[in-house]
Amino acid sequence: MNKQQFRFWLVPMLCLGLIVGMWALPGPPVSKAAAAEDGKCGQGDHGLLKKLKEERAGADQDPLKFSDIDFLSTSTGRAAGNGFLIGTSDSGCHWQDIYTGQWQFEQIEFPDNVKGWALARSGKSPNFNLLRTKDGGSKWSTVYTAGQSLQRIDVHDAETVVGYTRNAAYVTKNGGSAWARIPTPANTRAALFPKDGALKRGWAMTVKPGGGIQLMRTADSGRHWRESLTVSGGIGGEIYSSGDQVWVLVRGESGMSQVSYSLYASRDGGKTWTRVIAQNTAGGGPAPGSGKAVAERGPANPGGHLGNLAIADGAAYLAGGSPAAGKVGVGRSYNGGKTWSNVPATLAGFEAIIAFPAKKSGWLVVTNPDDAAIYLTKDGGASWNIKFDL
């Protein structure tokens, strides 16, 4: 996703996969030409990032690892890490170098196959820079953030971005030239203004005086807020939504490599809620909230650590990893949380991030360095095919 070493011919070909509308495959690197001609796919690391791996081989260096993935479709997307960005336009059969350089990517979002945004660090700095690209990711420029330390972004279109600090939300409608604060309730710890909410509909997770978590919602760009859900206990969490489907992850305590949490779902825009998962653990104690849950465990147990949640065509997937078992996997619901099933965790690792462009087709990247790899499923996570092994 960044500057310095980059190959101009790789990115235009990656972009072509979307632009021509025929999902044409990009011209493969020379070393993969023969494989492309006879229909074979690349394997392992596809011959990429060799120089960067050598540079990171020293004992005082951080090993290469993935940090995020972003897919426009099942076939076309990108994976980012500490100093690199790679991409595919043929469902992972072939991958291309897009960027290697100074930026340690934390989050990437591409509203189309040419323009994109990212949060990234440089060197040992603890702070994120907001970056944007206009050529598919080979060159990146820093973007003005009005002095705000953004922790996460939601990209609505090429020029409109909502940025979140630890307790507030901001929006730019002109590519970062100017920012405006979106009003949020007092004691906000997480917020969400989704793309399909047109900057009017939004959510905020607040800490209640005396303890507990409260979910608030707005329909008028934050001018007025009203309570939607109250959960006893909890120390924070995340919010996800798509249309009328809303999912709220409330994190509890952790200990002995175990995490307690509750997952709530609404199918009617926050009017009513279902407690979908209530994971109690010996190390983390009881899950936040009360009431019967659909499931007592999330994905990848024992002690499943959480990744992110993805919603696609009405289906919801939650990534999880178990340090004790050394496996990652997903749990899922196809009916807005009425039922929940955890797919057996079989992939090596203990941290994972997912992206599902379609109801049953999605990608999983293992983010811990020792097991760093990218996998594709076309059956809702029941089986996975490795597409890149770092």
Image (cartoon, helix red, strand yellow):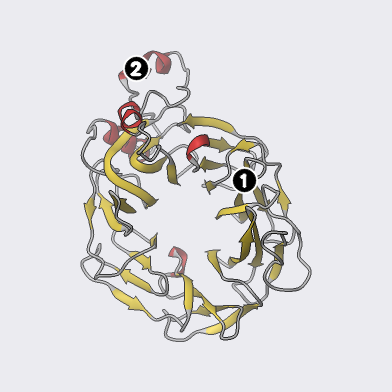
Give yes or no for contact between labels 2 and 1 (Cβ–Cβ under 8 Å): no
Residue in view at x 41 percent, y 79 percent: 221
Position of the N terminus by quadrant: top left
Q: Which residue is disc 1 drawn over?
A: 323
User: Residue 201 versus residue 50: which sits nearer the camera?
Assistant: 50
Q: Which residue is disc 2 drawn over?
A: 31
SS at mark 1 in the image: loop
> Depth-wise, is mark 2 or mark 1 nearer the camera?
1
User: Residue 387 versus residue 296: which sits nearer the camera?
Assistant: 296
The x and y percentages for residue 321 are 61, 47
Residue in view at x 48 percent, y 30 percent: 389
Task: Give the amino acid type for the residue marked by disc 1 in the picture.
Answer: Pro
Q: Residue furthest front?
A: 59
The x and y percentages for residue 233 are 64, 75
SS at mark 2 in the image: helix
Q: Is residue 289 above or below residue 183?
A: above
Task: Give the amino acid type for the residue marked by disc 2 in the picture.
Answer: Ser
- Neighbor class of circle 1 (other Cα within 10 Å; few <14, some 14-19, many 20+) is some
